[in-house]
Image (cartoon, rainbow, N blue to C red):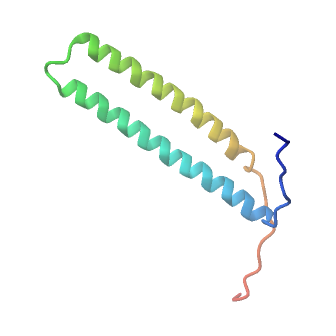
Amino acid sequence: MGMPVISPSTTSRRQAITDIIESVALQQTALSHILNAECEKLQRILGNKEASHQTILATNKSVEAMVGAITRLEMVLQSKLALFENCLCEQETNPED
């Protein structure tokens, strides 16, 4: 297996930055769906009158681990966005102006 070859792209700098920011937004949307699912899991367990204390504690531990993982991923996404915080792209001229 050889080394991967990356071909030069014709994508503009502005479009590349926009694509990265959009990818962060999509990742954050996915993480919000995961958090919502974890919330529903807790609600189901806590709404079950027959759930044992051990089951509730195990579920809580699982949810806590997932929230911790999501928090770490959010910090990575924040770092990705910070790369473009002071990034200025040249203004595109609009032919309708």
State whether residue 28 is above or below residue 44. below
Image x and y of residue 12, in percent: 79, 66
Image x and y of residue 89, in percent: 79, 63
State whether residue 11 is above or below residue 48. below
- Farthest top residue in view: 54
Image x and y of residue 52, in percent: 21, 13
Image x and y of residue 48, in percent: 17, 25
Figure label count: 0
Q: Is residue 72 left or right of residue 53?
A: right
Which residue: 27% across, 10% down?
54
- Farthest bottom residue in view: 96
Of 83 and 86, which appears nearest the observer?
83
**Quadrant housing the C terminus:** bottom right
State whether residue 7 is above or below residue 57. below
State whether residue 70 is above or below residue 82. above
Which residue: 14% across, 18% down?
50
Q: Quadrant of residue 91?
A: bottom right
Q: Is residue 76 left or right of residue 57?
A: right
Q: Quadrant of residue 46?
A: top left
Q: Quadrant of residue 15?
A: bottom right
Which residue: 51% across, 25% down?
68
**Quadrant housing the N terminus:** top right
- Farthest front residue in view: 1
